[in-house]
Image (spheres, rainbow, N blue to C red):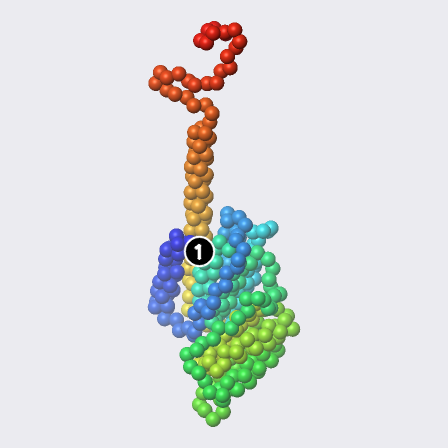
Amino acid sequence: MTKAIQSIPYRRIFFCLFGYVLLSERVVVGDPRAQTVQVMCGRQLEHNSTIFVPNFVATMENISEQMRASGFGVAVSGSGPDINYGLAQCYGDLSLLDCVLCYAEARTILPQCYPYNGGRIFLDGCFMRAENYSFYEEYMGPGDKAVCGNTTRKNSTFTESTRQAVSQAVTSASNNQGYAGVQFTVPGTNESAYVLANCWKTLNASSCRACLENASASVMECLPSSEGRALNTGCFMRYSDTDFLNKDPGNGSSRGSIVIIVVSIASSLVVLGLGVSMGVYIWKRRYIMKKRRGYNDAQKSARTLNDSSLNFKLHGESCHTNVEKIPGRKSGGAL
């Protein structure tokens, strides 16, 4: 994302609008867990900016409608090298209202991967990805990693309890449409290990289980730290000694529906603004490049004239030319 685009306070406008709605409606929400864990941008530059940007915005708009209805969405816009595939999904314990809030945050951050044509963002409550190819059945990849929280070092009892909780989550999620939230009491203490496991809904059961098993092996390397997250191509896993799970992922009240509508509109305006900013940036970049080409052409022409064999002298001085004398003619005579 360019400095010009980053300087425009679209996200600030969005959160001001959202704050106003919350105050006016007095809506009580859960925890959307909209904290960013990791943004991973692709390495391939977009092919054609004037086509890529509208395709990306159209994909995000299509997904937004699905997220408001079910907390999950996939969409495809365009064709050829500028085609855009998108996926967004909230984790299974989020209410629909919390989901929309989390997605709104992801939607304003992912465009920062521009001018690369792909990227993914892991938040603690949702996931979003966009690419120029169909990635929906991918469940493992070279970018899979664990992110550990080293705030507290736990004892062996917590470590063993966490291993059991993670194993239980893998089994439960594989048999529960890809989602599981587990609380496992640590023996002899008043604390618990909390685990969330979630696959993307585009995966089948076997791919989901394979992803979670790989994620569990990765996240267990964070122990004895008090918290760890596995960021995999097809799934997300988190354990913690703090209860981060939402207990009642209901769809919310009618006032919550009002917030969903307002937040969706606000986030749409944010992305639209980012799209316009991208367009302005592209136009300015091309204009500058065109001027540079003109300047370079002028310099080249000047060098060509300067290096020319025709060396004219002005102010009454004669032109020096190499004229072959004709035999029998005197210098200066008529030909």
Quadrant assignment for the N terminus: bottom left
| Closest to the observer, 202 or 191 | 191
**Going 42% across and 57% down the picture, which residue do you hit?**
270
Whole-percent x, y for residue 170 in the image: 58, 79
**Going 50% across and 63% down the picture, which residue do you hit?**
40
**183 versus 58 height, above or below:** below
Question: Disc 1 residue type?
Answer: Met
Whole-percent x, y for residue 145 in the image: 53, 71
| Closest to the observer, 29 or 159 | 159
How many numbered circles does the render carry? 1
State the image quarter where residue 139 is shown.
bottom right
Residue 71 visible in rendering: no
Whole-percent x, y for residue 279 in the image: 45, 48
Residue wearing tag 1: 1
| Closest to the observer, 304 or 277 | 304
**On the picture, is 18 further left or further right than 76?**
left
**147 versus 327 height, above or below:** below
Whole-percent x, y for residue 203 in the image: 61, 69
**Going 45% across and 23% down the picture, which residue do you hit?**
310
Of all residues shown, which one is farthest toward the bottom? 188
| SS state under label 1 | loop
Of all residues shown, which one is farthest toward the right? 206
| Closest to the observer, 78 or 143 | 143
**Going 44% across and 9% down the picture, which residue do you hit?**
332
